[in-house]
Image (cartoon, coloured by chain):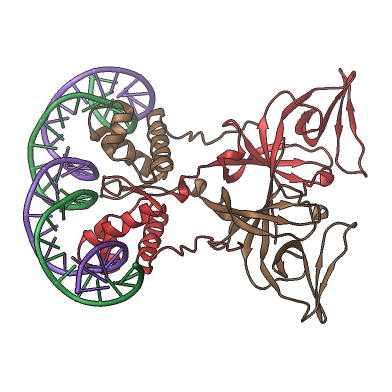
Chain colours: A brown, B red, C green, D purple
DNA sequence: TTTTATGGTAGTCATATGACTACCATATCC
DNA sequence: GGATATGGTAGTCATATGACTACCATAAAA
């Protein structure tokens, strides 16, 4: 029971694990795969041939894909695919405030959590979405889009300011509903000012402890 | 203010954008970067020199990092590190249940969110931590540890089963407190059974929409 | 024992590849 | 007009690099 095996690659020999790990870390650090001789140097062996054998074994076992070109090593494991997205400033979710500012930093997230390639994070401030489990300080993953469906959590620009609310389109108006019983909804009717949906919140990340 | 440049690459010429996009897609598809001549062929130009110029421009603008080796192109965006962690099964946060099972999959998260290298994710089921903004279906990022401080959210093994609760050490007993007024705390006194802390919840990821 | 898989040394070879020179065209900026 | 940046053609060159041959050692399997 309960044993958590974190990438142990049971069917690999220790040497093959070493090679795979080096290739992976080289890709992480340099952005491109190592040459056979670079791997050889890391292993402490003298020629490219043993390395080539190990890579062949790794390919046969399905861990990598080789091409007959320089640095022609590709990881088949899409495990480690992630996307680094900018943290685009702060949204005041309680009271309205200047909203989205410049990029504060970057945060990586699994590519499966992201749809499209223009998503970004916003750091939430305020308690207006507390009922939706979105707290002050959380990172909201936002996908830019102009439309929204009812009950979507959206970032809406209202009179030049960004708000994080539930979105409801009702009859002749849009209701921006905070998930907090102490706060009241904002009703926007045509002509009340500029209202545009910046995007939809498709994920939330919170750090604890 | 307010301009969100999410990979829009405003400061790139169309040609430079083409190059960057090709490099990115080549990395996605092949797992390693293209050569200058492969990029040239894609652009429809005849020699490596224009490509080299474009890559130099991209490096100067901070989009890539070049090395003077074959395929020595690394994306700076992927340099912000992430870690792929296993999703180690399900924790029933409401009622106690068999707890941690085998690995369901993997999920990448920014390395800054992880302390240590033996963390893992648990998929939450149940509503017992709803007051802490941890909902059914959320991914809880767990750092294994034996100790816990008061008010920490922990994964505790109680009589062979895993629970997700707030941890309080009081006088002669441990109180595992659900963040849900409809549920009552579990009091464990020495001799009541095996109680061990599996780990502390250091992050929560939730997918919306 | 023989075979097979793993893991290694030493070295050769063809060529893929980055760097470079020389030159040109077209814009934009001051 | 002159300077500068972008974008390109044609070609050369040194070497990095994958593939290969020949040979060896060890351990496990048949």
Query: Could you tell me residue B145's position as x and y percent?
Result: 68, 26
- Quadrant of res A111: bottom right
Q: Can residue A1 be seen in this view?
A: no
- In the image shown, does D24 or B83 lie closer to the viewer? B83
- Quadrant of res A97: bottom right
How many marks are shown on the rendered structure? 0
The quarter in which the C terminus of chain B is drawn is bottom right
> Left or right of B69: which side holds B6?
right
Query: Could you tell me residue D21's position as x and y percent?
Result: 12, 37
> Left or right of A190: which side holds A85?
left
- In the image shown, does B41 or B104 lie closer to the viewer? B41
Q: Is residue A17 visible?
A: yes
Residue sitting at x 77%, y 26%: B149
Query: Could you tell me residue A18's position as x and y percent?
Result: 40, 31
- In the image shown, does B205 or B59 lie closer to the viewer? B59
Query: Could you tell me residue B142's position as x and y percent?
Result: 67, 36
């Amino acid at each position: 029971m309960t044993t958590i095996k974190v990438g142990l690659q049971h069917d690999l020999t220790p040497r093959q694990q070493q090679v795979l790990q080096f290739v992976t870390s080289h890709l992480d650090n340099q952005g491109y795969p190592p040459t056979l001789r670079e791997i050889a140097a890391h292993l402490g062996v003298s020629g490219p041939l043993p390395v080539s054998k190990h890579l062949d074994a790794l390919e046969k076992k399905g861990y990598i894909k080789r091409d007959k070109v320089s640095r022609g090593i590709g990881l088949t494991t899409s495990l480690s695919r992630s996307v680094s997205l900018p943290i685009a400033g702060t949204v005041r979710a309680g009271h309205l405030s200047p909203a989205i500012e410049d990029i504060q930093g970057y945060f990586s997230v699994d590519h499966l959590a992201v749809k499209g390639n223009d998503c970004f994070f916003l750091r939430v401030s305020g308690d207006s979405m507390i009922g939706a489990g979105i707290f002050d300080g959380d990172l909201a993953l936002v996908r830019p889009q102009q439309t929204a469906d009812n009950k979507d959590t959206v970032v809406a620009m209202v009179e030049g300011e960004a708000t994080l609310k539930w979105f409801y389109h009702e009859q002749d108006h849009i209701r921006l509903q905070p998930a907090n019983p102490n706060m009241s909804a904002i009703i926007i009717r045509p002509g009340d000012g500029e209202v545009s949906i910046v995007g939809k919140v498709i994920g939330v990340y919170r750090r604890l402890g």
